[in-house]
Structures are given as C-alpha cells and as structure tokens.
Image (cartoon, grey):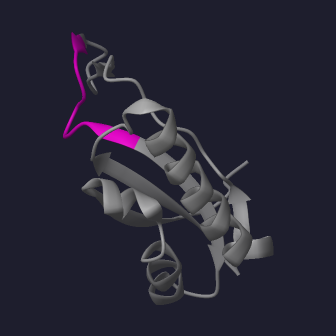
Amino acid sequence: MADYVLLYSGGKMPEGKEEQDAVMAAWNAWFGKLGGALKDAGNPFTPGAKSIGSDGSVSDGAGSGPPSGYSIVTADSLDEAVEKAKGSPVLQGGAGITVYETFAVM
C-alpha cells in the first residue's frame, strides 16, 4: 500500500446554502465509500499563493498552475488510486484531478 495525493485544480465553489449542503453531502458520501483508504480528506485552497524558486526567489501566484485543493488516499497502485479519484465530487464542479504517489522520507 502507498499514499496518493489527489491534487484538485479548477472548479467552482458552491453558491448558496442549498448548493453548499448538496456538495457537502456528495463529499461525505464519497469519503464514506473510500472508508479506510481515505488518509486525509484535505481542504480547498484559497486563490492566494506565493511560489519559491530553486534560487530562493519568491513570486506571487502559483508556480506551474493553480491547484484548488487536495485529498490523500491509500491504494495498492496508481491505477487503483485513479479509480478511487474518479468518484470525487470535485469533478462535478468542473475541476480536474492529478494523482501523485507520495512516500515518506523521514
């Protein structure tokens, strides 16, 4: 088993209480389906960001693209993590997902 970061990019925030409740219900249903494979439900990002270059320089904005949130799941392979990610409600909001395998180094 390995950990996989699901990096969300794009999409929109729900508008109004009714839409917010529906979106949260969809997220909770997906989290329930993932069960023990969900290691960190994650959170959305604000649009504000700063990037640090390899030379130590700091600039406003996202480095290579504006991510909008993340989750971390456990899976046996990258393909399995992708299958799990396909159920994410973030896709219904117009966002995309990039799946990365991660590993502990410390």
Q: Main secondary structure of the magenta part?
A: loop
Residue 62: image location, x then y, percent: 25, 28
Up the image or down, 104 lies above or below 21; here it is below
| Residue 66 drawn in magenta | yes
Q: Residue 20, position in %: x, y? A: 50, 40
Question: Is 2 in front, or is 14?
Answer: 14
Q: Nearer the viewer, residue 81 or 10?
A: 10
First to last magenta residue range: 59-68
Residue 48 location, quadrant: top left
On the rendered image, what quadrant is the N terminus found in?
A: bottom right
Q: Going by the image, does 60 lie left or right of 43? A: left
Please say if 24 is above or below 61: below
Q: At x 47% / y 73%, what residue is drawn? A: 85
Q: What residue appears at the point 42 percent right and 31 percent down from the top-left corner?
A: 16
Residue 100, above or below 24: below
Image coords of residue 4 (percent x, y): 55, 66
Q: Position of residue 7 (x, y in %)?
A: 41, 53
